[in-house]
């Protein structure tokens, strides 16, 4: 792959796409593979997922098809482990899987409503927790950890005490140093 072919910097990046068996997920997976990414396709429709993967492999893509119900924590965990074993840590997560139950609200059953919520909301959370979002977030903070409620409480106690009597009109950033290095996280061509 020439340098210009990887102008997006996705060459070799491990990308997980949920709902990749059809529609937007399939189109996203196709675009990622065309850009040189390695793709793990997750879908609960195994046949559609395998079909999409076969097409992408025929085009020379490195692709893994995984049967996964994103609303099920065990299924997501197993899929994440399969991606790690096969390719390594996920670089990009495209949380695309979603359900739509078209029709009148008054005829929507509670079971259908709960299924939509479990895929469209809970599934996103489960997938994000399985590529290690918290660990990645901690890596960009100079203190190398995500802040806790106690971190905020400690600053509030200080500001409420007489020890902070001469602190007035100040913004106190309790962010582990993130604001101080924020511009270092923005990619700037040529630097």
Image (cartoon, grey):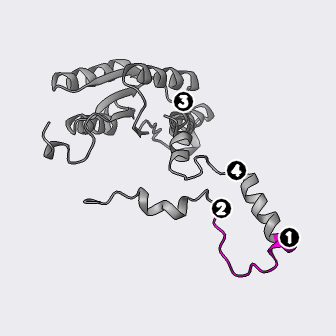
Whole-percent x, y for residue 47 in the image: 33, 18
The mark nearer the N terminus, 2 or 3, is 3
- Which of the marked residues, 3 or 4, is nearer the chain's N terminus? 3
| Furthest-right residue in this view | 162
Q: Which quarter shows the C terminus?
A: bottom left
* Distance of label 1 from label 4 (alpha carbons): 21 Å
Disc with the residue nearer the chain's start (4 vs 2): 4
Q: Which residue is mark 2?
A: 174
Q: x, y (%) of residue 166?
A: 78, 80
For the residues marked 1 and 2, what is the alpha-carbon distance in whole angstroms?
17 Å
Residue name at image x 55 percent, y 35 percent: 129
Q: CA distance from mark 4 to mark 2?
A: 10 Å
Between disc 3 and disc 1, the foreground one is: 1
The range drawn in magenta is: 160-173
In this figure, which residue is indicated by the disc labeled 3? Answer: 71
Residue at image x 43%, y 30%?
89
Foreground tag (1 vs 4): 1
Question: Residue 161: which disc?
Answer: 1
Determine the image quadrant of residue 114.
top right
**To which residue does mark 4 refer?**
148
In the rendered image, the vertical position of residue 184 relative to residue 92, given as above or below = below
Q: Identify the secondary structure beneath mark 3.
A: loop
């Amino acid at each position: 792959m020439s340098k210009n072919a990887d102008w997006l910097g996705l060459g070799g990046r491990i990308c997980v796409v949920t709902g990749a068996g059809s529609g937007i997920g399939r189109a996203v997976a196709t675009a990622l593979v065309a850009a040189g990414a390695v793709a793990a396709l997750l879908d609960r429709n195994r046949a559609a997922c395998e079909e999409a993967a076969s097409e992408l492999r025929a085009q020379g893509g490195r692709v893994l098809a995984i049967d996964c119900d994103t609303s099920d924590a065990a299924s997501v965990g197993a899929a994440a482990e399969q991606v790690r074993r096969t390719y390594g840590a996920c670089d990009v997560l495209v949380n695309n899987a979603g359900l739509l139950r078209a029709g009148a609200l008054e005829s929507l059953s509670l079971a259908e409503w709960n299924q939509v919520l479990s895929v469209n909301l809970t599934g996103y959370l489960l997938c994000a927790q399985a590529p290690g979002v918290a660990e990645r977030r901690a890596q960009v903070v100079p203190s190398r950890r995500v802040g806790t409620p106690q971190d905020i409480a400690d600053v509030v106690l200080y500001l409420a005490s007489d020890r902070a009597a001469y602190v007035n009109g100040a913004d106190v950033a309790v962010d582990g140093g993130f604001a101080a290095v924020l511009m270092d996280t923005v990619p700037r061509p040529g630097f």
